[in-house]
Image (cartoon, helix red, strand yellow):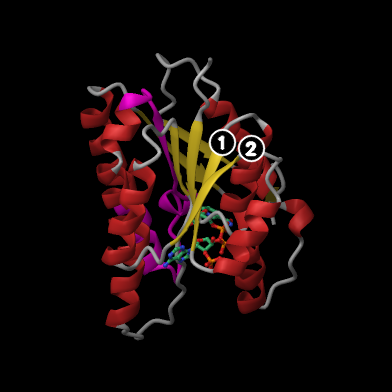
Amino acid sequence: MERRKIAVVTGASSGIGLATAQALGRAGLDVFLVGRHPARLRAAAAGLPRGRLRGRAQADLASLDDLRALIVQVLGLGHVDLLVHCAGEYDRSEAGRFDPERFALLFDVNVRAPYLLTQGLLVALARARGQVVFVNSSVVRGAGEGVALYKSTQHAVQGLTDSLRQDLNRRGIRVTSLYPGRTATPRMARIYRREGKRYRPALLMSAADVAGVVVALAQLPAGVEVTDLHLRSVHRY
Ligand SMILES: NC(=O)c1ccc[n+]([C@@H]2O[C@H](COP(=O)([O-])OP(=O)(O)OC[C@H]3O[C@@H](n4cnc5c(N)ncnc54)[C@H](OP(=O)(O)O)[C@@H]3O)[C@@H](O)[C@H]2O)c1
């Protein structure tokens, strides 16, 4: 019998992660959902095609205890074909503001968590000759006014992804950095509201657009790796 492919998706309760989990389920992968809130996780699980939910874990990725428990739970699956890092925190700060707790939180969730989760799941990923997709951001390319903290976490993720790729490729694991531009998600709606700008989601990419790219990556032959992929809407506004 053919082995069923397993995808583990963080941030599976909202936006790009939610759309990615659903698209992977529709594409025939079993999906393991990771999120913070039980009710949102339940709703995400209910949206998967019948039989595609491989499990779910409630984890606050800022917590090392939750991360350890998550790694143990996922290793219990035996193999992981695809690990998609979609969970993330965002921050916009006024000049002169100083919030060390926020600084630590963003680095814990955006950088430390995907790093530790990838390292913790290496054996299961290697067993499947799997793939890891880091959902990064187009913010690494622009000046990013007002988002120094968020931007610095995304540059850190870029650095760790580039370096990890060298080690992981030797074990047969492929690593992709995905850099979406502005995408219509609950986070983006909040950002436009905060910026006092009219929110026009039809002019942005949809979460499903980004999810479709992750599905395409999952369907690549095991010998092919896409290292970096920049996505953006054709509309400018
Ligand atoms: N939207 C865009 O335009 C855009 C562009 C470029 C890159 N991205 C990247 O895409 C990823 C997803 O963004 P999105 O727009 O889809 O945002 P979103 O709708 O706000 O979703 C963020 C996800 O991250 C989870 N999360 C946040 N903090 C967490 C924590 N401490 N522990 C566990 N989970 C946590 C959230 O869980 P809860 O449901 O529990 O809050 C949610 O599932 C982010 O990494 C973001 O940087 C987004």
Mark 2 residue crowding within 10 angstroms, few (<14) / some (14–19) / many (20+): many
Horizontally, is 234 left or right of 217 in the view? Answer: right
- Pointer 2: what residue? 25
Circles 2 and 1, Cβ within 8 Å, touching? The answer is yes
Is residue 183 something that shows in the picture?
A: no
Q: Tell me which amino acid carries mark 1.
A: Asp
- Distance Cα–Cα, label 2 vs label 1: 6 Å
Q: Position of residue 169 (x, y in %)?
A: 27, 24
- Pointer 1: what residue? 30
Horizontally, is 17 left or right of 146 in the view? Answer: right
Q: Position of residue 97 (x, y in %)?
A: 36, 85
Whichever of callouts 2 and 1 sits on the residue coming sooner in the sequence is 2
Of residues 69 and 17, which is closer to you in this image? 69
Q: Tell me which amino acid carries mark 2.
A: Gly
Is residue 148 something that shows in the picture?
A: yes
- Of helix, strand and loop, which one carries label 1? strand
Looking at mark 2, is its residue's CB closer than 8 Å to ligand 1? no
In the rendered image, which quarter is residue 226 located in?
Answer: top left
Indicate whether 150 appears above or below 127: below
Indicate whether 179 appears above or below 223: below
Of residues 92 and 130, which is closer to you in this image? 130
Q: Which residue does the image show at 63% across and 52% down from the upper left?
A: 45
Mark 1 residue crowding within 10 angstroms, few (<14) / some (14–19) / many (20+): many
Magenta span = 127-156
- Of helix, strand and loop, which one carries label 2? helix
Q: Which residue does the image show at 47% across and 74% down from the upper left?
A: 92
Of residues 187 and 121, which is closer to you in this image? 121
Indicate whether 188 appears above or below 171: below
